[in-house]
Amino acid sequence: MVHALAAGQRRGGHRVSVVAVLGEGRDRHPFLTLLEEAGVDAVPLRFPPRAYLRERRAIVDVCRRLRPDVVHTHGYRVDVVDAGPVRRAGVPTVTTVHGFTGGDAKNWVYERLQRRAFRRFDAVVAVSRPLAGALARAGVPASRLHVVQNAWAADDPPPFSRDHARQALEVPNGKFHIGWVGRLTVEKGPDVLLAAVQLLADLPLVVSVLGDGRERERLVTSATRLGLEPRVRWRGSVAAAGRLFRAFDVFVLSSRTEGTPIVLFEAMATETPVVATTVGGVPDVVSEREAVLVAPDDPAALARAIRSVAADPVTALDRARRARERLAREFAAAPWLAKYECIYRSVR
């Protein structure tokens, strides 16, 4: 989303710099290369753990050098650590709230601090209506709160053909192929998918899990205990994973919480049948005309939805076609970029 926003603003004639706060030991992050290929000035800043004062000073120095008209932050770390010094340096601040993940005690503390920090931003953008409601209840003034759903900016290389994608993921012939793409964390619900797959033992299926995260080891152990190996295949982080969606007979979004997930747009863009949970902004992106929707944290309902796609692929593909049409009609990049430009101009 940051790449699409920065690249789109650059094409619109604006001077754009993305300051990426990285850990030490990362010589080259692939995100920086993508930005530079789009003509965006990428500024990497590397710090050891908990070097917060040093980080704040560096951010202020960058602002003094670049002299931006507005600084737009993404993520709880920069919202909490860096946005305050930027404002004190006289630069208006905008943040986009992509959702709350929960997780461990550190994340809980950060998110609590982040909610307090939102009250001091010049503009706070929520990517879904439910998220905006939560922010209003947390004390963000209505005059500074905006709802801007994410958009689909198809700047990446085109997706692979179905045959090419299935070969790349080594999908056996005759297997119904379930795709799951995302961070392996509790809020994304990969464990719910595993529990659903256990209820589909009679189907000749294989699952490709694309992504990595702190829950991976526990999930692999759980899959082994449930007897799901080798039906479940752990692919790890895959560059440009959106190119592989045509390999899936169904894409499953099993999240417990979401903002407006870009991964859902990737499935829609490739006319991949979707089964998704009704969390966050998902129901604002797809209805039952475009996807099979189920309640979160319900493996039995998820299994029934997957089974319905396998049993009636023609209807599933018809829903996928309507999803692609809705993506092009309602989530184009140009109006999205224009909304953000209006917000930037308003805080100046």
Image (cartoon, rainbow, N blue to C red):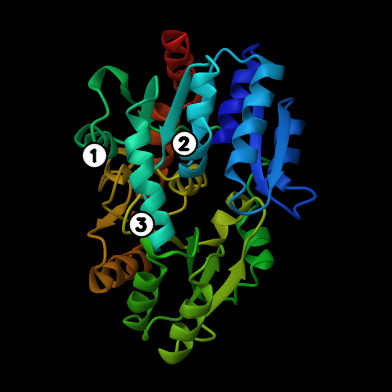
Q: Is mark 3 on a helix, strand or loop?
A: loop
Is residue 67 placed above or below 292 in the rendered structure?
above
> Distance between the Cα atoms at labels 3 and 2?
16 Å
The kind of residue tagged 3 is Gly
Q: In this image, 283 relative to 185: left or right?
A: left
Q: In this image, 28 relative to 271: left or right?
A: right
Q: Which mark is residue 79?
A: 2
Is residue 20 placed above or below 315 in the rendered structure?
above
Q: In which quarter of the image is residue 311?
A: bottom left
Q: In the displayed orientation, state which residue is furthest to the right.
A: 27
Q: In which quarter of the image is residue 20?
A: top right
The residue identified by callout 3 is 102
Q: Residues within 10 Å of mark 1 (few under 14, many from 20)?
A: some
Image spot of residue 279 (x, y percent)? 28, 51
User: Which residue is drawn at the image coordinates 24% and 37% (left, top)?
Assistant: 138
Image spot of residue 310 (x, y percent)? 37, 68
Q: Which mark is residue 134?
A: 1
The kind of residue tagged 1 is Ala
Q: In the displayed orientation, state which residue is furthest to the left.
A: 137
Q: What element carries label 1?
A: helix
Q: In the displayed orientation, state which residue is furthest to the front.
A: 53
Front position among marks 1 and 2: 2
Q: In this image, 86 relative to 41: left or right?
A: left
Is residue 41 placed above or below 171 in the rendered structure?
above
Image spot of residue 233 (x, y percent)? 56, 76
> Distance between the Cα atoms at labels 1 and 3?
14 Å
Q: Are marks 1 and 2 in contact (CB under 8 Å)?
A: no
Q: Which of marks 1 and 2 is nearer the N terminus?
A: 2
